[in-house]
């Protein structure tokens, strides 16, 4: 889950676009979001039509895939949506061998095969909204309207009547590629992975932004411990770009290299876990990326000099890497991790027969996000929004990591998108990724190797209802006799957990761990 929050100062703080302004936005939009996502909400019916085409200059060949029309009253360009907490209307349909110059119609009179959000096509009214078409020309990009290589049209404003003179949205431009601009204090590392390339049948690489310490150029013989920072859902290595070194004053003058890793993939966030759908990402990191990083930069090329941290999906990833490769890293400081116990997957027991993602045992609609006691997002409507968007969303990203690959070549779904019913058979295949269960089943071997290395922090009012799973893991680790530090912070949510004090504490503890482990060698 977003946001990507990594530490400022010693470890830098940044946030994904989907989360900017959250501290204000969560409360400001709560009422509006609750109304939009409320079960049974229906917009007034209206008849409308939009025609879409694409030019040969944008895409020279026939196209098969998903085509969208996004609507917005807030964004200058509707393609920048939908925002999780303030979503607006959009429609989509899949095409096969759609040719340049051929018109594709979206209309309330031709709804067969059309997808729409927040309701059915006949239930939405785009009058007064800005409209923009998007074509997902780049299937390897998880973002839709902002994904490099995807096509988009100019913006038009929909009138009250679009049947007599339907707007023509001509997709004639492409989202440009993102350019990583190195600075004196941030260097790009991109390592081609043989393992991932063989798995996907195309060239694949792992990337990171390496943030250099202040003394890096003045002390050319010095070697530094490294902190590997994993962004949350929607984050990437671009968040590590800086024009200044990280100024720090640590015990014994310790300074760190900081590596902001890119966890993005076509199906969402790969979490650096080997999977049937995303490939051997963890193995590629440990056996290919780390050796190359150690070769290019003056790192302490040993577990005693490698530390992990991350927030949200990055919190889960950093904990997973430490547990999976206990001898490769000297400790993890994971904050607000995604579910670490699938008996409490945002308050849903995936292993219990009869469970439903949309409603609880009494038939009440389930929330997926909150601000205190106020519901921000409902599971049913959030899942619908992602389903209309297609691959790359948060919920399907979990399935891409945890599920087997189906006969259709896609990740098996853990719940039915229409009814919300959980497929417990698929859920059971998730057990190898249930961190609490992995620890319990392998504790005799893992326990000694993880001594002093596990640090997990969670707010007791987590925005995405993640605290329950962390509490269960804490209780399990206590029963196992672990020295793991698992703290539940009162009054903190997903965004407010990482205070300046906690960031400073993490930096001090990493420094102490490095000095203790490295001096003991």
Image (cartoon, rainbow, N blue to C red):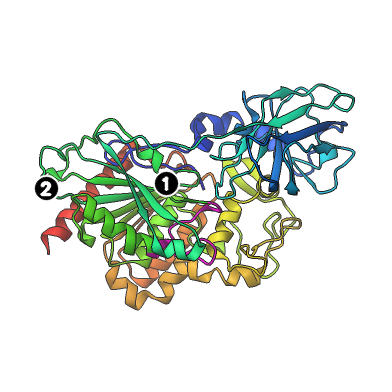
Q: Quadrant of residue 286?
A: bottom left
Residue range corresponding to the magenta coloring: 266-283
Identity of the residue drawn at 42% across and 36% down = 179
Whether residue 50 can be seen here? yes
- Prevailing SS of the magenta stretch: loop
Look at mark 2 in the image and give the residue it sits on.
222
Image quadrant where one finds the C terminus: bottom left
Crowding at mark 2 (Cα within 10 Å: few <14, some 14-19, many 20+): few
Crowding at mark 1 (Cα within 10 Å: few <14, some 14-19, many 20+): many
Look at mark 1 in the image and give the residue it sits on.
231
Q: Is residue 196 above or below residue 511?
A: below
**Residue 363 lies in the magenta-colored region:** no
N-terminal of the pair, mark 2 or mark 1, is 2
Residue 407 image position (x, y, % from top left): 66, 70
Element assignment for label 1: loop
Residue 499 image position (x, y, % from top left): 36, 38
């Amino acid at each position: 889950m977003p946001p990507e929050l990594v530490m400022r100062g010693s470890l830098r703080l940044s946030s994904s676009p989907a989360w900017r302004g959250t501290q204000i936005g969560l409360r400001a939009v709560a009422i509006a979001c609750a109304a939009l996502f409320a079960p049974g909400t229906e917009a007034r019916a209206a008849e409308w039509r939009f025609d879409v085409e694409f030019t040969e200059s944008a895409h020279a060949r026939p196209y098969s895939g998903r085509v969208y029309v996004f609507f917005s009253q807030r964004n200058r360009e509707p393609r920048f949506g939908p925002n999780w907490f303030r979503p607006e209307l959009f429609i989509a349909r899949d095409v096969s061998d759609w040719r340049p110059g051929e018109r594709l119609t979206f209309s309330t009179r031709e709804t067969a095969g059309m997808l729409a959000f927040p309701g059915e096509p006949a239930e939405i009214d785009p009058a007064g909204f800005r409209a923009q078409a998007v074509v997902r020309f780049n299937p390897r990009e998880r973002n839709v309207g902002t994904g490099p290589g995807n096509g988009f049209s100019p913006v038009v404003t929909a009138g009250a009547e679009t049947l007599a003179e339907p707007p023509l949205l001509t997709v004639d431009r492409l989202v440009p590629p993102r350019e990583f601009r190195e600075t004196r204090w941030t260097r790009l590392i991109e390592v081609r992975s043989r393992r991932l390339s063989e798995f996907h049948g195309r060239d694949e690489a792992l990337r990171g932004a390496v943030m250099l310490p202040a003394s890096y150029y003045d002390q050319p013989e010095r070697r530094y411990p490294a902190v590997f920072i994993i962004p949350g859902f929607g984050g990437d290595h671009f968040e590590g770009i800086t024009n200044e070194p990280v100024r720090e004053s640590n015990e014994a003058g310790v300074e760190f290299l900081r590596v902001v890793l890119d966890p993005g993939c076509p199906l969402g966030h790969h979490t650096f876990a080997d999977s049937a759908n995303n490939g051997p990402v963890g193995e590629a990191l440990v056996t290919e990326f780390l050796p190359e990083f150690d070769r290019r930069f003056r790192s302490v090329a040993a577990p005693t000099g490698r530390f992990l941290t991350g927030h949200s999906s990055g919190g889960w990833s950093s904990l997973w890497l430490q547990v999976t490769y206990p001898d490769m890293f000297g400790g993890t400081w994971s904050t607000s991790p995604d579910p670490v116990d699938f008996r409490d997957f945002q308050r849903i027991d995936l292993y219990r027969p009869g469970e439903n993602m949309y409603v609880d045992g009494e038939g009440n609609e389930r929330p997926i996000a909150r601000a205190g006691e106020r519901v921000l997002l409902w599971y049913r409507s959030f899942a619908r929004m992602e389903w209309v968007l297609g691959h790359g969303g948060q919920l399907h990203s979990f399935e891409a990591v945890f599920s087997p690959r189906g006969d259709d070549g896609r990740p098996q779904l853990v719940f039915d998108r229409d009814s919300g019913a959980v497929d417990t058979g698929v859920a059971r295949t998730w057990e190898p990724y249930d961190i609490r269960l992995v620890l319990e089943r392998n504790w005799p071997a893992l326990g000694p190797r993880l001594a002093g290395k596990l640090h997990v922090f969670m707010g007791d009012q987590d925005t995405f209802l993640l605290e329950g799973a962390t509490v269960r893991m804490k209780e399990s680790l206590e029963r196992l006799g672990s020295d793991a530090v698992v703290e539940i912070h009162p009054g903190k949510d997903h965004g407010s957990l990482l205070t300046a004090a906690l960031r400073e504490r993490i930096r001090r503890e990493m420094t102490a761990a490095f000095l203790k482990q490295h001096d003991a060698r």
